[in-house]
Amino acid sequence: MNISEAMTPDPACCTRGDSVQAAAIIMRELSVGVVPVIDSDDSQKLVGVVTDRDLCMDVVAEGKNPADTKVGDCMTTELITCHPNDDIEQVAHMMQQNQIRRVPVVDDDFHLKGIVSMADIVLCGDLPSEEIDETMRDISEPTFEEFQHLCALDAISIEEQK
């Protein structure tokens, strides 16, 4: 099965110049955790994504004003993408290897065609349950940096209890 059969076509998106507040409103209204960032409404060329985590870590935690902060100031530009004709198993493996749950779908010129989530892949029913389990386990496994951070938090907590 191809990704085009599982993806959400023509997802809501924003541009680098939009406020992060506008991106957050899209996330809230559509109940999504990622919004693709395009260069313009006309070309639909993908230039990044902005996630709820980007907004939390780069805007809220830094005390920035969401209405004044631009998406381009906090978006992720290192992208993992796929094409509409890519095989679902191949994309699930890509998600597993890169520990991501959502992948923008682009054409050969990087024009945004859709977005596919792990949930979309699971719901299509084309993957064996063992592969879904393994993929979800690997996606959810903390990175080394997250593990170090958790260990540091545990050490702080132990010190506070003394």
Image (cartoon, rainbow, N blue to C red):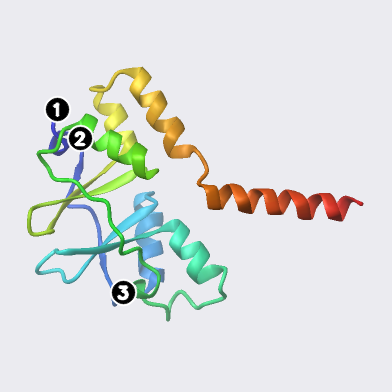
Q: Is residue 118 left or right of residue 162?
A: left
- Check residue 18 in the rendering and tell me which mark sits there, or answer none: 3
Task: Where is residue 5? Give x, y as percent.
Answer: 14, 34
- How far separated are the C-alphas under marks 2 and 1? 8 Å
Disc 1 target residue: 1
Residue in the foreground of this view, choosing between 158 and 122: 158
Kind of element beneath mark 3: loop
User: Is 92 displayed left or right of 32 in the figure?
Assistant: left
The residue lying at 39 percent from left, 52 percent from top is 33
Percent position of residue 90, x then y: 22, 34
Which one is earlier in the sequence, the residue at label 2 or at label 1?
Answer: 1
- Point out the frontmost of discs 2 and 1: 1
Quarter of the view holding residue 38:
bottom left
For the N terminus, the quadrant is: top left
Residue with the mark numbered 2: 6
Marks 2/1 in contact by CB < 8 Å: the verdict is yes
Q: Is residue 103 depicted above or below 69 in this figure?
A: above
**What residue is at 31 percent from the left and 60 percent from the top?**
78
Mark 3: which amino acid?
Asp
Question: Which numbered disc, 3 or 1, marks the residue closer to the eye?
Answer: 1
| Circle 2 crowding by C-alpha within 10 Å: few under 14, some 14–19, many from 20 | many
Q: Helix or strand or loop: what does disc 2 sit on?
A: loop
Mark-to-mark CA distance, 3 and 1: 35 Å
Decide: is 161 above or below 17: above
Residue at the limit of the structure toward the bottom, as seen here: 68
